[in-house]
Amino acid sequence: MTPHDLQIKNDESQILKTLDDRYESMVETLLSWSKINSGSRNRDGLDQMRAALIKKFEDLPGDITTPPLTVGEYVSPKGEKQHLHFAPAMLLTVRPKAPIQLVLTGHYDTVFPAESHFQAPEYLDDETVNGPGVADMKGGILVMAEALSSFENSAHKNRVGYSVLLSPDEEIGSPGSSALLHKLGKQSHVGLTFEPALADGSMAGARKGSGNFALIIKGKAAHAGREHHLGRNAISAMSEFTVALDKLNGQRAGVTFNMAKIDGGGALNVVPDLAIGRFNVRMQETEDMDWIRSELDAIIREINDKDGISAELTGDFTRPPKPMAPANAMVFDWVKRAGNLLGQNIRWNPSGGVCEGNNLWASGCPNVDTLGVRGGDIHSDREFIKLPSLIERSKLTTLILMKIASGEFDAQKAKALAHSEIHSC
């Protein structure tokens, strides 16, 4: 079938029209969800949000479970490695034996902690709401739920099975849910993720990869006046590491290093014996990760060569790069073609940001990861959503699902392309 042959059939049109009647209900639900603080570390809020999501998704066929996530590791400000336990995910499994399998992902955590001043939504105008999570990504989860509900009325629904994973740890790099993302991506033909698009509807194409690390440097405490010469200053050593890290910027195309936080020190009359530096790295190509690791190892060896100083690197690469490989380009083309039928001009650009789409691609699952609402200023108290996009994006996703089910969008071909691409690397 050529792009010009693609049409919205009469039965598909009827299903899409029913979404128009859902607007007021969707807005009401979004406002109520935004009032629930579900910061990544706020367990009570996450539990409350997950309960609301279960209630929203329980009308869909299939089974809902709340799988526990992998235990993570965290370096405390005292330099101690501690276990990090996460809230459970929500997993909906529908028709797992259907010939076409999809995975739809989203996250119900936000970047706003329980003590944040940003706790409730408010209207900026008739079509714009400012509020925590309205775009990133409670609005996207709502789009996903409404699209799936509409899809269940389609003629070819039984050809498609799907898993819906809503995770509580995406905003901190998906340390607990990454294994589950990999498992679901590996068994699925195509992935759909509902991160927000930009306010004009532009979507993310190729994405950089990311890694989060903590360097623990230990020295020797001493009185800063009487026995300064006996001390070994861990913060001084961390400063040298930070300067060396920053000098790596610009040495390899698309690779960046960002020292984000340093813990350590205490009383001004004590030589500090501990410093913890927390930093992020971004890379454009999978091969960049070997170079990054090699450069970090070289700098850390120099730190360890200092008398009385020891340095230990913790952390890892959390999300590999996601290129605009042929399989991903195919899925993006479906989105563009579906958008054209709906009068939506779909565009995309490369992004330095990362999301669950990176994890899905690493598992061999081609995907598009910005099917969520139009919005902007995410990760700030200016976060906003353009409310009409709730219906726009619900229709877009519903149409994509129906075209996958009818075979007009060939999910099995996309998966085969992804398999070929990854195994040729």
Image (cartoon, helix red, strand yellow):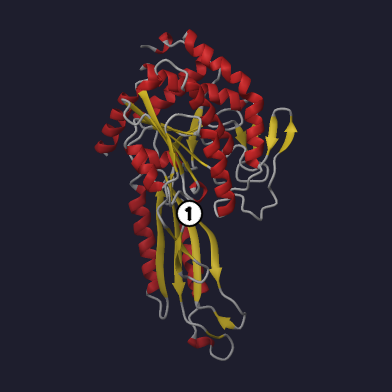
Please tell me which residue lies in front, 374 or 200. 374
Above or below: residue 375 compared with residue 245: above
Above or below: residue 263 compared with residue 394: below
Give me the residue at 63% from left, 54% from top: 114
- In the rendered structure, which amino acid carries the disc numbered 1? Phe
Give me the residue at 35% from left, 45% from top: 286
Q: Quadrant of residue 185?
A: top left
Image quarter where the C terminus lies is: top left
**Which class describes the residues within 10 Å of circle 1: few (<14), some (14-19), or many (20+)?**
many
Give me the residue at 40% from left, 68% from top: 312
Q: Position of residue 86 (x, y in %)?
A: 48, 54
Image quarter where the N terminus lies is: top left
In the picture, measured across the screen, residue 371 lies left or right of residue 252, that is right
Q: Position of residue 241 (x, y in %)?
A: 46, 66
Q: Position of residue 409 (x, y in %)?
A: 38, 19
Residue 40 in view, yes or no: yes
Please tell me which residue lies in front, 58 or 405. 58
**Residue designated by label 1:** 86
Give me the residue at 38% from left, 45% from top: 180
Q: Quadrant of residue 284?
A: top left
Q: Quadrant of residue 129?
A: top right
Please tell me which residue lies in front, 419 or 143. 143
Residue 336 in view, yes or no: no
In the picture, measured across the screen, residue 249 lies left or right of residue 23, that is left
